[in-house]
Amino acid sequence: MSSSSGTEFLLVSLGAIPGAWLRLQLVNHFEPILPRRHWGTFAVNVVAAFALGLLVGIDRRHSLAGTGLLLLLGTGFLGSFSTFSTLMLELLQEQRQGRWAEAGILAAASVLAGLLAVQLGLRMGAS
């Protein structure tokens, strides 16, 4: 592994550990409050979409490429904080339990809210 690859590995790893841990804590914290666990996953994914948009918007303004922040925060932290795979599993579980309407609402809301959140983040980061 080259020193560049080693640095990238370290940055992504250092971001991923707290990102995954925070996601677990937030989803578990809100589980008793929300009607179904998947709405916690939905909220985390929307927050992550906003934060990634914000980070990329800031990068466009200030060029963070050489700093390692995109790897640490974007790929590492936000990559493990958000979870597409869990969303897919939760959608499948809703379908298997015959809750097709809820699965459809969750899928549509995830895409629409995610797109709006990342767009808002980009605009805020670039201004």
Image (cartoon, helix red, strand yellow):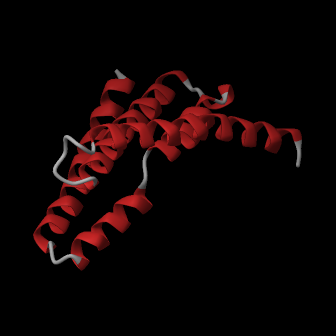
Residue 10 found in image quarter: top right
Q: Residue 88: x percent and y percent?
A: 36, 66
Left or right: 25 as drawn, with respect to 31: right
Q: Residue furthest right?
A: 2
Q: Nearer the viewer, residue 115 or 106?
A: 106
Between 98 and 15, the residue placed more toward the observer is 98
Q: Residue at x 15, y 72 (%)?
A: 99
Residue at 36 percent of width and 37 percent of height: 26
Side of 5 where 126 appears, left or right: left
The residue sitting at 19% across, 45% down in the picture is 34
User: For residue 28, which quarter of the picture?
Assistant: top left
> x, y percentage for residue 7?
78, 36
Q: Quadrant of the C terminus?
A: top left
Q: Is residue 96 left or right of residue 47?
A: left
Displayed quadrant of residue 67: top right
Q: Which residue is situated farthest in the left direction here?
A: 101
Residue 92 shown left or right of residue 34 in the figure: right
